[in-house]
Amino acid sequence: MASVSRDLLDAMLAPTPGRPAEETFRTIPLPNRVRELLSIIGELYLDATNAAGNAGRCMLAAVLLRRDIIALAGNEALTGLKPSISLAIMGEAADALVGMFGREGAPSDRRRQIGHCIAELCNSISLVSADTGKEFVKTVLSKLQPGCNAMDPMCLKLLSDIADRSPVALWSSCNTDVFIALLRGSVEKVKKKNCTMEQLESSVRALCQIGIAYERAKRVAEGGERSNEIERALLAQLQERCTNVDSDSPASQLGQLLLPAALDALTSFATSSSTSTQASQVNILSTCMSHFSACSEQCPSLLAGNDQALTALLRSFMAIAQIPSLEDEEIAALRLSALEIVATISSVPQIKRMLLKPVGKSPTSVAQPCDQPSPMLQYLIQGNEGNGDQKGVLFVCAELIVTGADDDLETWAEDPALILNSESSWDNDCIALHAEALLESFVENLGGASTLPA
């Protein structure tokens, strides 16, 4: 009988016509495949004699194992395995993978691959047995706590992956206190500026994904009883936009406690003099922006649950939106992503009311002026006029529009003279077009009217 071996993995990495190696792999029974893949991953995990050759094998073995873990959660008619047997096999895999992940000295790329398999196990076990899935999630999180508090990027990324793959199991087995305990140490390191940008990005990733997982789990709970766990899991994976902010929700509480320090550190990194010269830092900052962007769409409560959280968010992203970009398109894109997060947040009805809320008593009629305009609205539109260190969103968007258009002057100078068509003059200028769309969004969300032609 065929078995999973290094030779078979090598043959799959160098496929031949007809792909006989893959056909051989498929003939191996599912339980055997899982156990043999676990065994060979364990061997490769410890074998440091051929790091380059083993890297490809280990990645392929992890991908195949992850695929088979998904298969174990399938219907008995498809797998030929009773649920109890599937759970037993996944239990064996869980013990082995958690042990490998926690082993010191392992290469980070291999720990990441093992982490993906553990996150998939959380999902598959929950599909077969919700109660067993909750217990496994608790076990994994207890193992991750020391690493998360030490800001180990691999532990934080695994926490994020579990939140993404198993949001219902995560929030069914844990509460706000558990997540605070997991991330408290990382927050202290961030406050002391005792972390790298990679560690900060991993921490932001985990926090945002936990918030998004809360909204997904809540959506499943509000949907009532589903016919089976698979339907609930599918519903939990849908990326729906959330337009509601609950200041008392667990997500909001996490944001209020854990986010300010991360925003402060992120702003410090972004506005440091080295950011404009190091492409790696810009890439990590852009990754952070993508986490916040997803969170602004799917869990605004985490980012702006109350006035204080919203103010901290606005100040941080407005500072990032004003990093000098000169002719660097990557930094211009980073600035635009910061502005887009602010635009998305300000479009949420409850947050819009927070922004437009005046100081003092509300007017009794539309014609009666309020005591004083909203300070957040003034800041967002005008910036810090007194200090002059930050401009408002309208100025920054206009600056990006002009900068983007000006970058094309040399090309335009070579073109024959034509009548300017304002509707298509920026068609090839992505920066200017994006900034124009954001400017329009801000004008509409902050109480204005459309600036575009009807």
Image: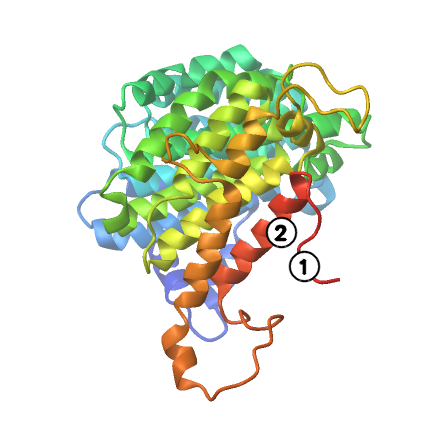
Separation of residues labelled 1 and 2 (CA atoms): 8 Å
Q: Position of residue 426 (x, y in %)?
A: 53, 69
Front-most of 390 and 236? 390
Q: Where is mark 1, residue-wise?
A: 452
Identify the residue at horizontal 56%, vertical 16% (top origin). 253
Identify the residue at horizontal 43%, vertical 53% (top origin). 333
Q: Quadrant of residue 72?
A: top right
Disc 1 to disc 2: CB gap under 8 Å = yes
Q: Where is mark 2, residue-wise?
A: 440
Please give the label number shown on residue 283: none
Front-most of 442 and 294? 442
Identify the residue at horizontal 70%, vertical 40% (top origin). 234
Front-most of 163 and 296? 296
Helix, strand or loop at label 2? It is helix
Q: Position of residue 67 (x, y in %)?
A: 53, 47
Apparent side of residue 440 relative to residue 409 in the rendered image (left or right): right
Q: Position of residue 239 (x, y in %)?
A: 65, 42
